[in-house]
Amino acid sequence: MSRTTATPSTARRNEPTSRPAAGQKSPGSAGTPLKPARGTARHALEGGLAVLAALAAMSGAGYAALRALGADGSAPPTRLIPALTSLAFGGRIDLTADLAPKADAGAGGGMLDMLGGGDGLSLGISGQVWAMPLMLTFLGAAVLGWCFFRPLRRRVRPAPALLIARAMGALGVTAVLVPVLAFMARGSLALPKSVSDKLGNGGSGSGSGGGLGRLTGGEGIPSLDFTTDVVLTSILALLEVALVISLGCLAARRTSLPAPVALSRARLKWHPLTSTLTGIFTALCTIALFLALLAGAAAATGRGQAAKAAGALLLAAPNLLSAVLTSGLGASWQAGMERRQPQGGGMMGGLGGMGGGGGEAGGKQVDVDISGKAVAGLPLWLIGLTLLLCLLVYAGYRTAARTPARTAREEADALLGRHMEIALRAGVAVGLGVLVLGLVSQVSMGIGFSLMGNEMGGMNAGLDGSVRFPALAGFVLACLACYAGSRLHTVRYGTDRFRGAPGAAHRFMRFPRSRARAGGADTTA
């Protein structure tokens, strides 16, 4: 056999392919009929339906979580579920309320009544909430990716214009539906009686002795009006949909993609790693979702705590997973609450702000170090480090299995060795992933009180974690662990043997050049 027919070009030889199931032929083989690529309108419609399915999955999971937590009655579901969906896209919720004293004498009056509350004087309340329920975000991304790329299996390779039409359909539906959802996310949120009474007592829990209690005569805050930032939510949603599609073009397997995408240098180099890491993260989130379903089944037997656990997992399981894994990289997660008090003296300082204090400039701060907690007698950081190390070694092993072997010429021209190249790519991907997860897992909430244009104090609460050092530590750990995993694969199978790899490397060597150039050939990843 001649050299030209046995050895294809470097780019086409390295294009990732998948191993067909036992007893089946390869999707691109002559014995397997391929579906037609269909027209532009069909691809645009399928892209739009993928976004619609993702939004439906996010809304359904959000409603189930609210029912499990018993919060579905605090506001109409048609208002509350769009608010949760907006948060899942990274949007922000604004809180407002106007609190006036009771007019009857039995209410005790309060400072507002003394200052002329009957003439319309009221206490202004404003605040913001930013918290991403990452389980809803994950479900939306997973459903979008599956519905977007799954129909491309076993189809004739589409032209680049068809993939662009598919993406434009998804982005167009996002640009229409997400602003509508964000606009619907407005209404009145009824606060639980315990929270309302505590705020009415100035947070002191001792009658009307707090600052807010002295202003309103001990009256609580029955409800808050909430709205979302429509523009910010829409922009973030468009960026996230584009990110999911771009990442899918790198990581999707067993999918027919246009030749410029399938044979691009970015996909050829990053496909083995991105497909492995996205698969691991998807598996972790799916396990958390399964645990949420188990907790929901236990709640059906009458166990109230199981229902709350199911609701929390349906909203924030990836947030918890992120805190555990980054704790193993040195992240310090602090959950805290701080009371803001007005600066200086005068009437506002004498009221002591909202904390019931004596007018001091600094507010009371309560912090809880989550990273230092112990689970089953083991520190949380040790659990996270052990789990992360095992996952990264496995990621290096699977990435090496999916990476084709180099030819002698490629090995001589390469700047880095094969194992070191895998390790560095893994380090970059994991470092960026840790940085993003650390940022989106944080929670921020602030609420302030004002009277006659003057700030009367307020409260800040949230969950904060360090991100820079964990990202650097994740880069180093991923390099070392994935290098070890890649070496382990070589020790088990040898340098040029890929018996356990999905898409074995020896199949790349038999990929004909003429077939790669054919417009109807199917290149699966």
Image: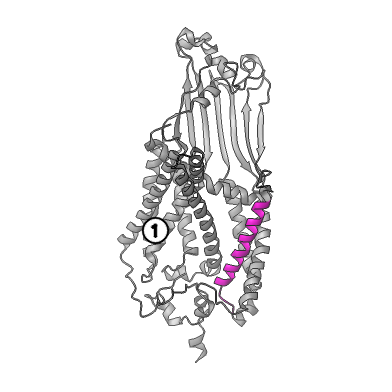
Left or right placement of residue 389 versus residue 122 in this view: right
Q: Residue at x 45, y 55 (%)?
A: 142
Left or right placement of residue 11 versus residue 384 in this view: left
Question: Within the magenta stretch, is there residue 57?
Answer: no
Q: Position of residue 24 (x, y in %)?
A: 40, 76
Residue 173 visible in image:
yes
Left or right placement of residue 488 versus residue 163 in this view: right
As drawn, 98 above or below 184? above
Q: Work out whether residue 375 or residue 91 is closer to the camera in this orientation and state it.
A: 375
Task: Say which element carries label 1.
Answer: helix
Residue type at numbered disc 1: Cys
Q: Position of residue 470 (x, y in %)?
A: 66, 51
Residue 329 visible in image:
no
- Residue tagged 1: 147
Task: Find the residue positioned furthest to the front.
Answer: 301
Q: Give the residues drawn in magenta, as a range.
A: 382-406
Q: Residue at x 61, y 63 (%)?
A: 426
Q: Residue at x 63, y 30 (%)?
A: 338
Q: Position of residue 237 (x, y in %)?
A: 45, 48
